[in-house]
Amino acid sequence: MEGRQSRCETKWSNAGESRNPGTPDGNKLPERPENHKIRAMYKNPIILCDYSDPDVIRVGGNYFMVASSFNFTPGLPILFSKNLVNWKLINYAAENIPLEQYNFPQNAKGIWAPSFSYHKGIFYIIVGLPDEGIFLTQTDDIFGKWSSLKLIYKAKGFIDPALFFDDDGNAYVYHAYAKSRCGFNSKIGVLRFNKKFKVCEGEDKIIFDGTEKHPTMEGPKVYKRNGFYYIFAPAGGVAEGWQTVLRSKNPEGPWEDKIVLKEGESGINGPHQGAFVETPFGENWFIHFQDRGIFGRIVHLEPVLWKNDWPLMGTSVKTGLMPGEPVLKFRSPKSSILKNLKNPFKKPVCAFENCGLEWQWSGNHSEKFAKAERSFNPDAENFRLAVLHCGSKNQNDFPVLWNSSNVLTQKIQYENFYLKAVLDVSSLPNGSRAGMIFLADEYASVAIEKTVAGFDFVYLKSKNEDLTDDTRSEIEVYREHLKLKNENQPVKIRMDFISFSTYSGAVQFTVKTGMGLKNSFKWKSDFFTTESAHWVGGRFGIYAIGNANADENGSALFKSIKVRH
């Protein structure tokens, strides 16, 4: 990966297959058996949320997805489904990134394009960090803790790795190259994988060069079927590219190639990186992402049929013509009847204990960042955020929010929604701020600042003329002193997000306190518009920060936190 640009409940199965379970020769969509649920039509996208570079495996009757997480922690989100259409976030595989530099946000760096494998009862996730190398984590319990990320091959610019266990006992790591790091791209390389020591060994070997026909080829996913090795890989760039499939009788080539999926007249740009999966009922599907600007890299599902040992994908399953185009809707995959599921988790990894899984920090985190407090409303959350100075850069004595790890955010999941919270500022120390933020390429924030004179309302916006990964400064757009009746007077903050195109949206903040009192305060911002985010979708959330002199025993209590659409 390089380039700018629901609940499912059932009884768990311990049966499992590897990434390459084999596929029947069916050349038409199978009929629905009588003992399975009625198959409705599904619509794309199946996930309107930024799960970039998705990879999917099936183990028994269960499907698991992993996606990129960049600098955000916990990282490597894991989603679960029984039918490939409805997905639920269930865990994270990486609590933090075990490298010191990620203690501060390394925006647009970190965990790029992971891939899933399942082999002899062990789940593996392998991932490329573009500046550091290829890392691996594993577990025998996908619902519990994963091993800490382990460096298995040190290299700069080795990205999008896929671990493939062949049926002859050999194992390989296929990968792409980031031109921004190593000076070239459009090629696929392979390394041997030592299964005993869990490391890559030997020299890297380039096995396919897509420079002429498939420029910017990346994100290889490897499968074996009917004696052929297949590499599914996107090319042409995130925004305007296509899906290529390579085929060979040898795991290192030479390769035949075909373009199997392209935007065409569908209006679904990309279509980019993803995963092939076979269901227990012999159906074949392909999951991929589409770059939707501020909404991030959202997830689509395409039907797949095989003809002459090549995959027909998307509209090709009906027309027989290659390349196919992404479908807007299609008959849902066959799936078992869903039953109530008692949560199998011992304790999923999350940003802090008892918070929703959607929340992530902007960099590595620790237990002192926050804690959840009891909420008497089951539909709302109460968080106490510690006032911390966790930024790598300062401006006017305060850490710049773009470079602060202790900013707690989540992804956009709806085309229109709002976030609201009640802020208790009674524990804010002098020299601290607590507030709400919307982050994209640029960002805007409202905050309450504690000064020696009391409390000020502050409206901030970012400024970045060069649009580099690591540089942001902040502009104080508006400031007003608040005449609170006392420190316990609550401040109500709300952020409304409104989409105004397929790729963009606008945010408006509202802040009010003391309504009905003599010194009441109410303020509403202009619309902050944005059309793109920084390699990720837009994010929104809350924070509590302090300058160098702020008492780190201070805190901000956000009560009745709700996201609604």
Image: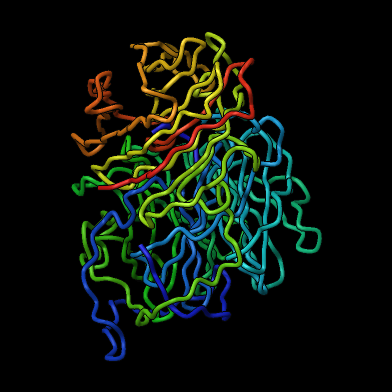
* 419 shown above or below 182: below
Colouring of the image: rainbow
In the displayed structure, does residue 27 sit left or right of residue 140? Answer: left
Q: Can you see residue 131?
A: yes
**What residue is shown at x 66% (from left), y 58% (from top)?**
146
For the question of whether residue 184 can be seen, the reply is no
Classify residue 303 as left or right of residue 236: left
Residue 223 percent location from the top left of the image: 53, 64
Foreground residue among 147 and 24: 147
Give the side of residue 361 with respect to residue 542, left or right.
right
Q: Position of residue 21 (x, y in %)?
A: 53, 75
287 relative to 343 in the view: left or right? left
**How far from the left and from the top, in percent, is residue 284?**
38, 71
Name the image quarter holding residue 184.
Answer: top right
Picture residue at 43% right of the left edge, 54% below the top: 274
Rendered view: 528 above or below 171: above
Q: Nearer the viewer, residue 458 or 221?
A: 458
Which residue is rendered at x = 38% and y = 29% of the image? 489
* Residue 131 versus residue 43 in the image, above or below: above
Residue 224 position by quadrant = bottom right
Q: Is residue 230 positioned above or below 351 on the image? A: below
Locate residue 498, reporting x and y percent: 22, 36
Name which quarter of the figure residue 165 lies in.
bottom right
Judging depth in this view, the residue of 261 and 353 nearest the camera is 353
